[in-house]
Amino acid sequence: MKEAHIEVPARDGFPLSVTFFEPSQDCGVVVVMHSATAVPRKIYTPFARAMAQRGAAVVTYDYRGIGESRPKSLKGFPARMRDWARFDAPGVVDAALENWPGRKLYGVGHSYGGHAMGLMPDNQRQERIAMVAAQSGYWRLIAKRDQPRVWTLLNILGPASVNLLGYVPGEHLGLGQDLPRGVFEEWRRWCMTPDYFFSDPTLDLLANFQNVTAPVLAVGMSDDDWATPRAIDAFVRGFTATKIERLTLTPEQAGVRKVGHLDFFRAQFATTLWPTVIDWLLGRAATAGSL
């Protein structure tokens, strides 16, 4: 297996930091991994390597403003959450299919990454989709014990940080990495709306959900306070033209006390939580590629 760290253009030309994972054996599939909000692509490297070992070419990338796609300063950096789906995600898919022409395109999305696969242009190119902890972000669908903290973050700490700094210091507020102002403000507005982004009249990308006809696996964790069953249900209803298969995993299956919203992709779960998802995604392709 070979790994290459490169830059590819988003559809509007913005340079994105990307990693290509080239497998030693070819199962005829390229998988693009779409990250969660404020999560750098390096978090997904162990999972990408596991899929590459099964014969899939894999691509991970950082959205604009995140990880190695971040400018020196986020103050005044023009980015909205919809830009990740409108420009970044399809630009990376374009690069993946150009680098590995003729391969089937599969997608893996974590949290917002699942949103991106429904929103992005040309998403009908995807032939199989696995989403982990992808949910409606409406704050009242979060577990009740976490609702006060999230409300405070969205309505007090986040806006105050934006007014003071020009961005949200996510690392200090428990969000992962820092967020550009426009990303936070759009995310906040959606999270305070019962239908999340599905009732946003300015979001023309919503029409792309109906283009997804690929099978979809929606994975949730039993101890995830953000992607609760109700929140997952509220999101996956947007995929009106395909079948949704639901899977709930538990910390007990992995012999740990906690997995939550972010930890599924940690290497410690390679032999416990990952196999079911990777088998669902690559099982047929890997078998066909080995004949």
Image (tube, rainbow, N blue to C red):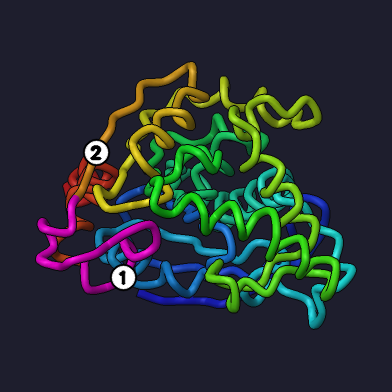
Residue 66 position in % (x across, y down):
65, 69
Q: Is residue 52 visible?
A: yes
Residue 63 image offset from top left, x and y in percent = 65, 61
Numbered range of the magenta stretch = 250-269
- With respect to residue 32, does 125 lie above or below? above
- Seen as rendered, the residue at the extreme top is 241
Are circles 2 and 1 on residues that touch, CB within 8 Å? no
User: Residue 247 shows which numbered tag?
Assistant: 2
Looking at the rendered structure, the number of numbered marks drawn on it comes to 2
Q: Residues within 10 Å of mark 2 (few under 14, many from 20)?
A: some
**Looking at the image, can residue 40 be seen?**
no
What residue is shown with label 1?
266
- x, y percentage for residue 215? 36, 29
Q: Is residue 256 above or below residue 99?
A: below
Q: Is residue 86 left or right of residue 135?
A: right
Q: Earlier in the sequence, mark 2 or mark 1?
A: 2
Amino acid type shown at disc 1: Arg
Magenta stretch contains residue 260: yes
Choose between 215 and 82: the one closer to the eye: 82
Whether residue 39 appears in magenta in the rendering, the answer is no
User: Relative to 266, is 262 on the left or the right?
Assistant: right
- Measure the alpha-carbon separation of dots 2 and 1: 18 Å
- Bin the neighbour count of mark 1 within 10 Å (Cα to Cα): few under 14, some 14-19, many 20 and up: some
In this view of the protein, which residue sits in the foreground, 234 or 152? 152
Question: Which residue is drawn at the image coordinates 23% and 42% (left, top)?
Answer: 248
Identity, as a three-letter code, of the amino acid under mark 2:
Leu
- The picture places residue 67, in percent across and down from the top left corner, at 62, 74
At horizontal 69% and vertical 54% (from top left) the residue drawn is 155
